[in-house]
Image (spheres, rainbow, N blue to C red):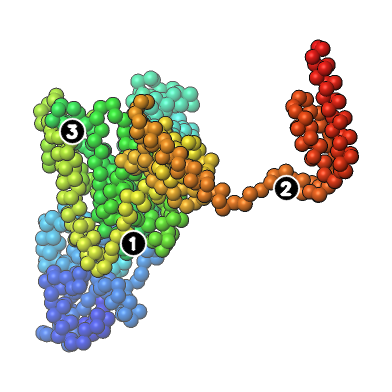
Amino acid sequence: MPDADWISLADFAAAAGIKEPRVARRVCAKAAAGKPWKGHLLAVRHVPGRGGKGGLRWEILADSLPDICRARLPVPAMAKAPAEPLTDWQRDTLAFRRHLVQQVLTEAPDKGTPARAAAVARIAAQTHLFRGKAKRVHQRTLYAWVRAAEEAGGAGLIPQRPSNAGQPRVTISRAYDKGIDLDAATVGTIAREIEKEAEGLTIRTHYSARMIAFICSSKLERLSRAAGSKLSAAELRRLCKLDGRWAQRCRDLIPVREFNLDASRYHDRRAPRTARTPPATPMEVVFSDVWNCDVAFQTDKGAVVRVKVIAWQDACTRYVWATPVLIHTGAGHVRKEDVVDSFHHLLCDAGMPRILYLDNGGEFAALGRAFDEVWPDIGAMLKERGRTVHAKPYNGPAKGEIERFFLKLKEVLSGGQGFIGGDRMRKKTQTHGKPPAPFVGTEAEIARHIQRAVEIANNLPMPALDGRSPCEALEDHIRKGWQPTRCDADAFDALICKREMRALRQGVIQVNGQRFYHDELAATVADAVEVRIPLRSGANRVWVGKDGQFLCWAAPDRAFDMVDGEGAKESARRNKLAREAVRHINAKRPRVDGMAALADAVGLSPAAGVEPCAIVKGGAAADAAALADARHGQSDADRETLLADMRAYIERDDASEGGA
């Protein structure tokens, strides 16, 4: 082996940062005994020379040093670098060969000696470990490796890649390439057609590799016959038979198949993700989702119920607040009212979140719209802007750790009675052919069973929280001074609601066919009022306002019996409130003569004289005199003349009516 591949003890000590020569000699002695130095097994040898015990000095193979030490060596002492970067396989093979060659050269440094033959025979008889597998090396191979190391140094032990590495050596199959009676160009064309068929079946169907190979075998036989093959049908069928391993060449297209046919699996395993850091304080971001409980439940009265869990998880502490929903047969599914009720429980316990990250399901749509509408109102309370985010379909990782919490909750429930398992078509049962024994109890006991499992899951340690449980993480933040921002039932119903305008008729408003009343409505003079209908199921009242100002919480109106005197009294009381409201408005408004105001608007002066021209039928003479008196500014003579004329006219008119 050239001396350029071996370095002296002094060069090794300088490169390794060892100041004492005795320490460097101790490292070499341990390496000769097979002990590693800083995780690397050094290749060392004894050669005649000054500076060592008994006229022998240590030398170290430069290739066996760590990269950082090799970089500190003088250039002439370094082994020659390969022309191309080594692959993992070449690097592992080089280390394996160098280890065996070093053993031979250490025991027998001289060529052609019985000692070397004995060393080669001993090593060849042993079983070695190479890349996790047992391996035996023949004596001729060992001699070739030793000879290459002595002639070319460490570079001689590097395995060389074949010239056709990375190129297919078989066009279709060994049997087909060897036995088909077609030229190479035709075989290549057929191979491309078959591969396209296999690729299309891989990305467009759920067929197994064996099924794809069967279909391609049939097509290969037809294409070969069409290309001019003269082989018999039996021989051609034998050559064209492909197996599942042949179809495995399309396994790199499996992600495309999942994208086309299994969106959920693709987004869970293949879609690129970015790392996200959790918020620093609780209730900054809250995730929500609905989980189907994998436990069979039955009430004490024999009714089978399905249980779903509406969960809310804090992104900071991973703590989960959950509300079980017990659904009897025929009762439908989780609705928006259930989600709002669960959200109300969250606010009563943990306070108002800043950002709600909701599932894409329809049951969360109403809450999301209401939450977005009320943020301008509650923004001043939280002194920051909030919003809602709806997760995209098939995007489980977007909902934080809540999916992982569901897996943990499922594991907790699997230790109890009635556990079904994730696949409802393959129920885990105690006996073959029978459904699992359900968890039997009252509705309160079933809900308590689910809440107990949630409590257990919240107290299990999590690696993401440095071994703490979500409950401990939340308590740590509370001890540091964090406090939730809670709101009472009135504020919740006024914020999380549906806003509409409703007509005010006879002191009441109607919502969903039900009359709502309050004394403020009876005393309100308006044609329509603003109504906020709470989304919470237990809130049997509505918020009423006018011009953006709160008026009252209207409750369902009371109906009286037709002959009940109390109804008349209540009606009179309400009318009194309405009249007082009207009087109050009248008292604050000036009295106005509409005709005078209109005459003034059209430019007529109130002092302008207007000649009356009226036909009066019937009535007494006093009426005629009163009409004559209406003419201001006339003389008495004119007035008497006018009255005489009017009396004569009336008498003629009466006579004519009598004659008729």
- From the viewer's side, name the closer residue of 29 and 202: 202
Res 279 label:
1
What amino acid is found at the position of numbered circle 1 in the picture? Pro
Q: Position of residue 496 (x, y in %)?
A: 39, 47
Depth check, mark 1 against mark 2: the one in front is: 2
Mark on residue 455? none
- Residue 478, picture quadrant: bottom left
Q: Earlier in the sequence, mark 3 or mark 2?
A: 3
Q: Badge 3, how many Cα within 10 Å: few under 14, some, many 20+? A: many
Between disc 3 and disc 2, the foreground one is 2
Secondary structure found at label 2: helix
Residue 393 at least partly seen: no
Residue 204 sits above or below residue 579 on the image: above
Q: What is the three-letter code of the residue carrying label 2? A: Ala
Pointer 2 local density, CA inside 10 Å: few below 14, some 14–19, many at least 20: few
Which residue does the numbered mark 3 point to in the structure image?
296
Give the quarter of the image for residue 329: top left
- Which residue is labeled 2 in the image? 597
Image quadrant of residue 532? top left
